[in-house]
């Protein structure tokens, strides 16, 4: 495997989890569901992107496109699974976890398409009793419903985005400092009781993981609202003085 994961179109395999760098900070992911050996660029990729090439989230669709359209003249790269060096790689380019067999990944991709095209909607991976609505199935959300989530689910059966996890971890470092300052201010104003620094740190650090899904959903709309949400969750345990 090349250091930078770059592969030629002719080197793709059925079930590959491929990606391109669509910007300096963001990757676009897909799953190869058909390989055309005569013309590799006409191979098919399942992706979650806009149908018209725009960047408007409300135009995003889970769809099948040619490899040529998927890569948009960018360098094509293959995600690595079972990597011992995943922690040193950019999030979304390599995973420590093992993946399913290629044919199962392709079956999962076709299952998604069948549910969207012929069923009641895509079944939410984290809640198998709740199908996505038509709007949700075709509604891209940078934090909880994106192309990496889709590709990773096809390959592993789990719905996560390493890019988002890394973002939340980075944001949380600053977020926790802001929340601590808010709580210290409330304590000084005697609006909430004082609490030991160690207990405060442990409590705040436990809040973000527990609220991560809702936090990401709100963060997609507004950073300020996301901070307010976590701050409110942080002060809930305190009785009003």
Image (tube, rainbow, N blue to C red):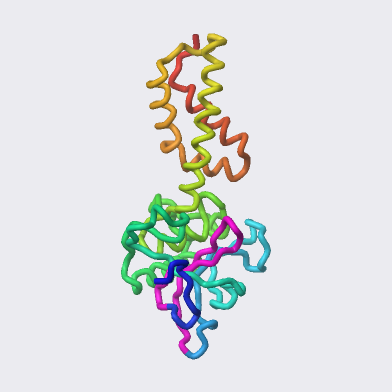
Question: Residue 196, image x and y in percent?
Answer: 40, 16
Q: How many marks?
A: 0
Viewport quadrant of the N terminus: bottom left
Q: Does any portion of residue 93 appear in the rendered image? A: yes
Where residue 74 sits, quadrant-wise, is bottom right
Q: Quadrant of residue 96?
A: bottom left
Percent x, y for residue 19?
A: 50, 67
Residue closer to the observer: 130 or 209: 209
Q: Is residue 114 visible?
A: no
Residue positioned 33% across, 64% down in the render: 99
The percent coordinates of residue 185 (x first, y second) are 56, 16
Residue situated furthest bottom in the rendering = 38
**Residue at 49% across, 53% down:** 163
- Please give the name of the residue rendered at 57% of the width and 78% of the height, measured from the top-left corner: 68
The answer to whether 174 is drawn above or below residue 87 in the figure is above
Residue 83 point in image, percent of width and height = 34, 61
Question: Residue shown at 52%/88% (left/top)?
Answer: 39
Is 209 rendered above or below residue 9?
A: above
Is residue 28 a member of the stretch shown in magenta? yes
Q: Nearer the viewer, residue 82 or 213?
A: 82
Residue 155 among magenta residues: no
Look at the image and give the residue range highlighted in magenta: 13-37
The answer to whether residue 213 is left or right of residue 227 is left
């Amino acid at each position: 495997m090349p250091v930078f994961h770059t592969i030629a179109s002719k080197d793709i395999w059925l079930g590959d989890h491929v990606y391109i760098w669509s910007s300096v900070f963001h990757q676009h992911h897909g799953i190869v569901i058909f390989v055309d050996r005569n013309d590799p660029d006409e191979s098919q990729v399942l992706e979650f992107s806009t149908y018209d090439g725009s960047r408007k989230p409300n135009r995003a669709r889970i769809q099948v496109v040619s490899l040529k359209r998927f890569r948009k003249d960018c360098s094509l790269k293959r995600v690595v699974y079972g990597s011992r060096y995943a922690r040193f790689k950019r999030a979304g380019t390599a995973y420590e976890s093992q993946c399913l067999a290629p044919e199962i990944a392709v079956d999962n991709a076709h299952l998604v398409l069948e549910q969207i095209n012929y069923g009641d909607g895509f079944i939410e991976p984290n809640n198998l009793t709740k199908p996505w609505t038509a709007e949700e199935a075709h509604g891209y959300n940078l934090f909880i419903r994106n192309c990496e989530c889709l590709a990773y689910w096809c390959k592993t059966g789990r719905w996560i985005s390493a890019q988002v996890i890394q973002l939340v971890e980075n944001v949380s470092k600053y977020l926790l400092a802001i929340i601590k300052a808010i709580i210290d201010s409330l304590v000084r104003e005697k609006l909430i009781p004082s609490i030991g620094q160690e207990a405060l740190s442990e409590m705040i650090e436990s809040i973000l993981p527990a609220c991560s899904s809702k936090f990401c959903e709100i963060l997609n709309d507004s950073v300020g609202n996301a901070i307010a949400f976590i701050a409110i969750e942080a002060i809930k345990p305190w009785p009003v003085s």
